[in-house]
Amino acid sequence: MDILRSVRAVAEAEGPGVVDWDRAAAAAKGATDPGSVALSDAERAGYAADVRDARSRLAAVAGIEFDVPDTVEVQNRHHWIDASVGTFRRVMDPIEAAAADLDEPDGTFDATPARRGPAFARDLSRVANTGSMAFALGFLSRNVLGQYDPLLLADEPAADHGLYFVHPNIVAVARTLDVDYPRFRRWIAFHEVTHAAEFGAAPWLPEYLESRVERGVEGMTDRGLDPDAFAELQAAMTAVEGYAEVLMDRAFDGEYADLRRKLDDRRGGGGPVRRLAQRLLGLGLKRRQYERGAAFFRRVADERGIEAAGAVWERAENLPTGEELDDPDAWIARVDP
């Protein structure tokens, strides 16, 4: 970990965009211990068995056919930063494009005294944005345990999805929570493979989410908001997180009450710096998504069965609305799964 290298990378941010992505990634890695991915043969076989077993068990319980992504990686924290910076960049592309429209037609700035102020201000803004992005990437890389990446907004729609496990974080959190590491690793695998099941059962879902992200971001660049796009995106992501919580609880092959309790405590705990970072990055919102979505699907599964709850992925019209998330019976009456 090299804090000076991290600070230097942010200070040297340059280029035409609102974020210098290369330096944001370099700064995040400079401030983050990568951790070890020196796996024993048993650990390597364990990850493979966890993913394989999760796929077969989840398919049987949910009644959903899906494939595990071809790309399954056990990463260190720097690997995760490199894999994730492209996702952040794709989401920011519309804002980058809008900022470019404010430049000179040929993409340069006029060097006359009257224009030095705006150019200097934009340089400062780029440094600040790069520092903020470096902070986000670094914090998340130290806390993400596993991730299913559907590669939203990718240039190639057919690009393979990815399934990542951040090994040093899994080991560290298992130790902190005082739980059995292989069992905890398996729990994380079940959660992430559940997301693969959702997207596998709903081939329309990536395009649906992409369209809401694009509409929402485009609205922001026009100095307005598209409340409908954000509401639909929020409802869809709440369904994604909630279904995963309920399905993995019902499919996991062992007692999990202690894991659930300790993970919930971890999501809401930590010191003041961690809590501030969670708030700034919207992780409190993500926790509420888990809780709200899980309550919805528990009611549906209790009323109609877990397979019936999977009707949400049959077509976009079956996604619950914001109102239905708080009134599952209304969704059951409308969709009749």
Image (spheres, grey):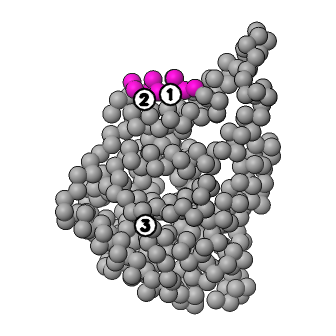
Labelled pair 1, 2 in contact (Cβ < 8 Å) = yes
Q: Is residue 291 visible in the rendered structure shown here?
A: no
- Badge 2 is on which residue? 6
| Range of residues picked out in magenta | 4-14
Q: Is residue 18 visible in the rendered structure shown here?
A: yes
> What residue is shown at x 50% (from left), y 82% (from top)?
65
Q: Secondary structure at mark 1?
A: helix
- Badge 1 is on which residue? 10
Q: Assign the C terminus to one quadrant of the image.
A: bottom right
Three-letter amino acid code of the residue under disc 1? Val
Separation of residues labelled 1 and 2 (CA atoms): 7 Å
Mark 3 or 1, nearer chain start: 1
Numbered circles on residues, count: 3
247 within the magenta span? no
> What residue is shown at x 23% (from left), y 63% (from top)?
43
Three-letter amino acid code of the residue under disc 2? Ser
Residue at the top extreme of this rendering: 113
